[in-house]
Image (tube, rainbow, N blue to C red):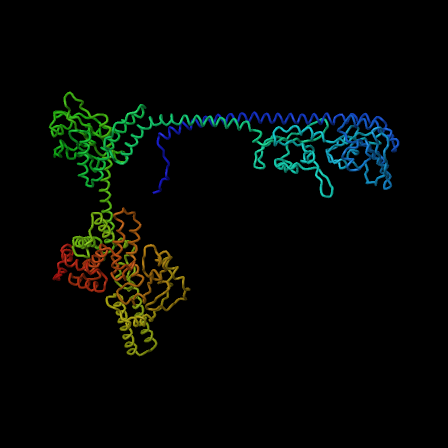
Amino acid sequence: MKREPKRFRFTIQVQIATLIVALILILGVTLAWYNYSRTSEIIYGATNQLSSQIAERVIQQVNLTYGPVGNNLSILSLIGLERALNLEQRLTHIGTLHRALIDLPAMSGLQIGYEDGDYFILRPVTAYLRTRFSPPDNAFLMVDNIDYAGEQSVFSRLYFDEDYHLLSQTIEPYTGYDPRTRIWYQQAISQQDTVRTEPYLFFFMRQVGINIARALPGNTAVIAADVTLQQLSATIAGAQFTPSSEVVVVDPQGQVLAYPDSKRIILQSSDDQVSLSHITQLGSSALTWFDSVSKLAPGQIEFEQGKLQWTGSVRTLPSSSGLDLRMIVVAPNHELFSEAYTIRWELMQITILLILLAMPVAWILAKRIATPLNRLAEHARAISNMDFDPKTRVYSMIKEVDELSDATHMMSDTISRFLSLIDSLAREKNLEALQERILKETCEVAHADGALLYLLDADDAAMSPSTLYSHGLFQQHNLPDIEVHKERSPLTRALTNKRPSTITIDANEGSLPELATAMQASRLNMIALPLHDRQQQGFGLLCLLFIPIEGEDDSASRHQLNFVDALSGFAAVSLESKQLQLMQKRLLDSFIKLIAGAIDAKSPYTGGHCQRVPELTRMICEAAHHSDTPAFSNYHLSDEDWEALDIASWLHDCGKVTTPEYVVDKATKLETLYDRIHEVRMRFEVMKRDVQLDYWIAISEGGNPAELAAERDRELANLDEEFSFIARCNQGSEFMSEEDQQRLTRIARRTWLRTLDDRMGVSWEELQRKAARPPETLPVLERALDDKPEHLIPRREQDRISPDNRYGFKIDTPEHKYNRGELYNLCVAKGTLSEEERYMINDHIVQTIIMLEKLPYPRHLRDVPAIAGGHHEKMDGTGYPKKLGRDQLSISARAMAIADIFEALTAYDRPYKAPKTLSEALEIMERMVKDEHIDGELFRLFVANRIPERYAELFLEAEQRDLYPSG
């Protein structure tokens, strides 16, 4: 049975207190969580709003900073720069260009590219330019000019003070720079409007910026402004809203365009190469999360990085400048929601304080509720332990608990009475005693004056009354049977009801006046409770009789009636079970004897064997049961053991139903379904006719009649004598010597001529066996006796007993199922059975064990196969089928072996042998004791108790009862 897992249980006081505290805790946690969630939502919304404000400021900065650049370029395109074809002409515009740079600080330089490859650029001298190029101290403007002439291009660099006086002019190595190859030139020259490039790193200035360009009139030159994004970094530097928050502007690929710490935007390698930083290269653990383009998609984001939870957003910065920028704003949750965490903790502290205050109150309240329930639980545990003693009345302020206390006391009393009745009924095994017990117990429980049972007979035609129980005694009566189908009395109607019926009986009129007389009352009240079987079919009535008392209620209380009704149901089951057990036992007994009788009737050689062995086995076992000798001191059989012994005895040879009759009844060596000696006789008749025929043929050919007649008579005599020898061998009544076997072999060599096909008219099975040899050409010389291939009947694999069989059989299985060879069978040395047929005979005990072990036995019958299957074993372990020794066999099995042998020796209904007398049988069995074939102690007990003599008086003929030997 599967064990139930251990369950943890707590008192109701603990559970009620825990429930109250848990409710307060749940309420506090819910409020704290609600406030935390709401505060988090507000902060989260505020963060989004702040992010939007930062984005708007950045957009505004972009628009204010870079929007006017295009307007200035439009104005500058009108001053005639396209006509300034050399340095001198271009320097005439230096003041105008410088003014444009002053008006728009975001521009770091103005440059003009010409269609012939000339290039001109004006830059303010910044601290970075001073560090890189070392201009004159008072240099204010720096001008680079390229007069393009292919490889002979001249690259000039000029420095001016703030009054535009030339301070120095140098010729620099030409770098191969061609403005026509630049993206700002190509975009502007192909369009009529102002164009903007994507942000990139100004290598010369080491800053991030864009080019805003416009073609000059005539499309002969392009003017472009270098606009840095330095101001964006300054704008977002003031946008951090928590100490660790991050704000960064990147392009769609993640290259950083603006960052509060602008120094991190530019990466410089060891070989002085510079490039834009990727967002993951800014040195911020939070920003390393943006390691793929997909994470730069606009939207709200939450992620974990650096063991911290971060919240933020990615926004696209649309602007009139046409730039495609992404702004990323993120902050750690512990900083972002610090206020919400504080509120949540304060609410948890308040909840804990409430719980501490509520715990003693809850504990006291729970104790007031739990104390009565604990006492009721103790009462219930006592009931579960079958302790039905009265308990102290439990009172409670809770109505349901008080009612539960009343119900518990009533249940205790009812169960106590009911179990007492059930126990007394269940212990009763005798049907008649069971009926009396039901009447007595039911009458006392219902406080009735009498009780009576009516039960249907086997034909369901009438109800017969049981003994009447009245005033504590069982009384005889002359109550009549009630015919169910002929009379429509109140009792017949009560039988068909589902509920109890109340019937009034008068001694002077109505039905059953005899019952009132027997109860010595003028009037009776009867409660008839129908008894139903498992199919809900009525099979009787349990009648309770009450003598009415004037002035009192003359009926049982409703409580008593319900109780007795419930009891009657169990009484019905008990009665039906006992009846079914008796019927099943009788059916089983009859079926077993039917099988045994069928086995005996199957063969006239074993008739009565299965009926006599049980009687003889019981005699021997009774002697052992009552013996006080040490060998049988522990051998005591109960009623159930006797039942097992009887069944085993009656079924000890049930396996014979599988043994062919012609094997069991085989009286001659050549017998199968018929005696094949007739075939052999016909062959000798044929050979004798051949001798006669040869004689007459020789006469017709002129031979000497006298010599031929003498030879003919000698040959005929030899044939007669040889057949007579074969016939004697066929009977198998004597041990066959080796010389006789050799003579049979010589006789078998005689031949006769067969002219007809021996495959005609035979069965399909025999034809298959003949197919083992090729057909012969007729006529064919046949031997007088022969062992042919078709005489061998193969054994199927499933018919073999394997050495490791589950039954423990230890039997050598012959190769063939049958060997019907004529010479083979006639040469059997002893008896009429060949090795294969003897195996078939012995196989009956194997089949007995197999058949009996397949049956589903109740516990007390589980030894039936062992008892029945051991009667062919020997004490020395050489018997069959399991080669069990004395110590491996029960006394009952050893007793059956003696009974089986004694019955077989003395049986007078064996046509193939004469029955043995008592003295002959006992003499043979004494030799078997010496050879350790049967149990010596049981055999001596068998003789000492004169069991053979008692058996002989019952079953043997008078002439077999010779002088009985003294013990």
State the residue at coordinates (73%, 41%).
Answer: 273
| Visible residue check, residue 761 | no
Which residue is the extreme one toward the top? Answer: 551
Instruction: State left or right for residue 342 relative to residue 661.
Output: right
Residue 375: x and y in percent read 29, 30
| Visible residue check, residue 819 | yes
Residue 483: x and y in percent read 18, 32
Judge whether 550 appears above or below 649 on screen. Answer: above
Judge whether 66 appears above or below 814 on screen. Answer: above
Residue 893: x and y in percent read 24, 55
Instruction: State left or right for residue 807 relative to residue 529.
Output: right
Instruction: State left or right for residue 951 relative to residue 796.
Output: left
Specify the quadrant of the image occupied by residue 60: top right
Q: Nearer the viewer, residue 16 or 161?
A: 161
Count of all numbered marks drawn on residues in the image:
0
- Which image quadrant: the N terminus? top left
Residue 35: x and y in percent read 51, 25
Judge whether 904 appears above or below 45 on screen. Answer: below
- Which image quadrant: the C terminus? bottom left
Specify the quadrant of the image occupied by residue 441: top left
